[in-house]
Amino acid sequence: MKGIDMRVFGYCRVSTAMQANDGDSLDEQVRRIKGYAMMQGWEIDEADIFVERAVSGSVPFVDRPEGGKLLASVETGDVIISTKMNRAFRNARVALETLDTLKAKKVGLVFMDLGGDVTGNGISKMVYTILAAVDENFRDALRERVRESKQYRASVGLYNGGKKQFGYDIVDGKLVENAAEQAVLLQMMERRAAGISYHKIGAEFGKDAKSIKRMLDRKA
């Protein structure tokens, strides 16, 4: 039952500029939020629907432009509606910290894909906690696949982006050995094999000790 002073807020998010410019995903989220509010007998103003455009879910909710404004706007008894948990959170720790903040302010948080207010009873929080952990687990698996892909590309001589490795040139998207720099690497390896420290090798070749170690570790 809606209280006299209760306000209803909506939260939508897309992670890429393409989705934001296309508008379909955001429009659909707004439509569903309005529909949910109407079924609950709640009124929601257009100005109270916070739309986050081209912001990654990995950015903490409070640090997002619209997320931060939303948290600053809600007061005791208010309700926030979002279509899916992953529109708001991609990290279990951040999700539960935000949940605790909202519960302390007695603000409801409705995720339509979870069936209602996750700040309510123990079962809702249990489901919320499990799904948040699973979602984070999925992102960890995705990062691992990206890392494996980069390792494979490196193993077949493809360039992964970022700063060019010393000893190589980039030709048509591939790493190609630079003869002069490879000769320098060989000299560094010989000095290291002779027991000379990274610091002294770095001083000789105009680089710091950490850079020398990193370059020789790659060459090993």
Image (spheres, rainbow, N blue to C red):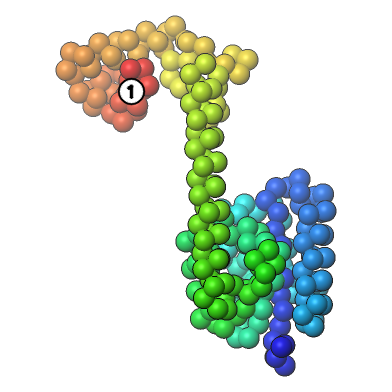
Looking at the figure, which quarter contains the N terminus? bottom right
User: Relative to the observer, which residue lies in front, 41 or 157?
Assistant: 41
Quadrant of the image occupied by residue 67? bottom right
**In the picture shown, does residue 78 fall above or below 49?**
below
Task: Give percent across and percent down for residue 141.
Answer: 51, 42
Visible residue check, residue 215: yes
Q: Residue at x 77, y 72 (%)?
A: 36
For residue 63, say whether it is visible: no
Q: Residue 122 at x, y = what percent?
A: 52, 76
Residue furthest out toward the bottom: 4
The structure residue drawn at horizontal position 48% and vertical position 15%, both measured from the top left corner, is 168
Name the residue: 67% across, 51% down: 15
Residue 107 % position (x, y): 60, 80
Kind of element beneath mark 1: helix
Q: Nearer the viewer, residue 24 or 163?
A: 24
Between 10 and 67, the residue placed more toward the observer is: 10
**The C terminus: image quadrant:** top left
**Left or right: 96 with respect to 111?**
left
148 or 213, nearer to the observer = 148
In-image side of 158 versus 82 (left or right): left
Which residue is tagged 1?
217
Q: What amino acid is labelled 1 in the image? A: Asp
Quarter-of-image position of residue 193: top left
- When asked about the image quadrant of residue 70, the answer is bottom right
Rendered view: 91 above or below 125: above
Instruction: Return the x and y of residue 9 as percentages of the image width and height.
Output: 71, 75
Q: Is residue 86 above or below residue 127?
A: above
Please, which residue is most extreme toward the front here? 123
At x 55%, y 59%, the residue is 131
